[in-house]
Image (cartoon, helix red, strand yellow):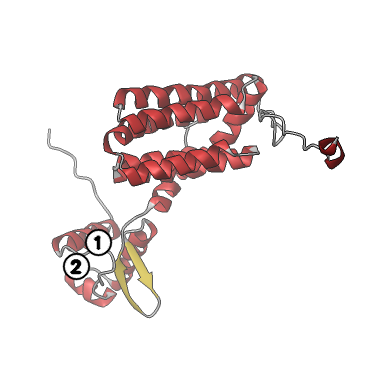
Amino acid sequence: MPRSIKRTSLTDQATEAIIEFIEERNLRAGDQLPGSAELSEMLQVSVPVVREAMAGLAAIGRLERHQGRESTVATPNSSHLSRLFSLRVIGSAVDDEKLQQFREIVEVGNARLAARNRTEDQLASLDEAMAVLASAQSAEELHEADVAFHAAVARAADNDLCELTLESLEPLLWRLRRRVWNGWVNAGGEFTSIIDAHRVVLMAIRDGDEDAAAAAMSRHLAQARAGLEESIRAGDHEVAPRAGFPAAKKKRSVRSAKA
């Protein structure tokens, strides 16, 4: 039985033709494309079809359109992939548990590669990120510092796709982090054990021990999984900003110090 022929619109065909043109001419980010009229003649389609194709390519970050001059080639960045991730999660059955599963795959792999590929500069960046993380005084500071630490691990992995994927997931992971932290604290978890787990990850990366780094990251993400499971089990109960953190040390008064 002959294979069925899939019909595609003129716009889809024009889109593929423009992508092929970019690849054949070896055009790079910033290089200018021919105008809509010239592309229309080259592709033998109408100018509106070309413009629609170019608008679609601009939406996914492959082209950059400019007022009053021709479009230029662009490289899609994390914001474009992030938008796709968000739309996929919103429009399907991808729940936080599946997002956590995907995070574990990406982050454990990042830790393993970071132990293999880290440089002295990247270790210095990890040390700095660890110091900021350990000094967090509220849940929001913790989440922000945690993002920075894991981003530093991804950079140390020295794989653009790993870094791009994690960066693209960040808007979704912010929501997941809040939910995880609420569940972690409500189940009796504390800030100190989270910091200790990050330090073990950093130590293994510094030692260049790939297996230990992957295992340490896996154990850390098991903490996140425990927090998420508690939120799923008991409901999402938001905690106070400093809940789970060590009690602030009271300052001694001048009078008591003199005494």
Q: Residue drawn 17% across and 71% down?
A: 42
Question: Residue 85 in the image: x percent, y percent?
Answer: 43, 42
Q: Give neighbour class at mark 1: few <14, some 14-19, many 20+ (Cα, 10 Å).
A: many
As shown in the figure, which amino acid type bears the numbered disc 1? Answer: Ala
Q: Is residue 39 left or right of residue 94?
A: left
Q: Residue drawn 22% across and 76% down?
A: 38
Q: Circle 2 is placed at which residue position?
A: 43
Question: Residue 78 in the image: x percent, y percent?
Answer: 40, 50
Question: Residue 162 in the image: x percent, y percent?
Answer: 33, 40
Q: Are the two marked residues, 2 and 1, in contact with CB atoms closer than 8 angstroms?
A: yes
* Quadrant housing residue 180: top right
Q: Is residue 173 left or right of residue 241?
A: left
Q: Can residue 6 be seen in this view?
A: yes
Question: Residue 114 in the image: x percent, y percent?
Answer: 32, 36
As shown in the figure, which amino acid type bears the numbered disc 2? Answer: Leu
Q: Circle 1 is placed at which residue position?
A: 14
Q: Is residue 166 visible?
A: no
* Quadrant housing residue 68: bottom left
* Quadrant housing residue 228: top right
Quadrant of the snapshot with the C terminus: top right
| Measured Cα–Cα span from mark 2 to mark 1 | 7 Å
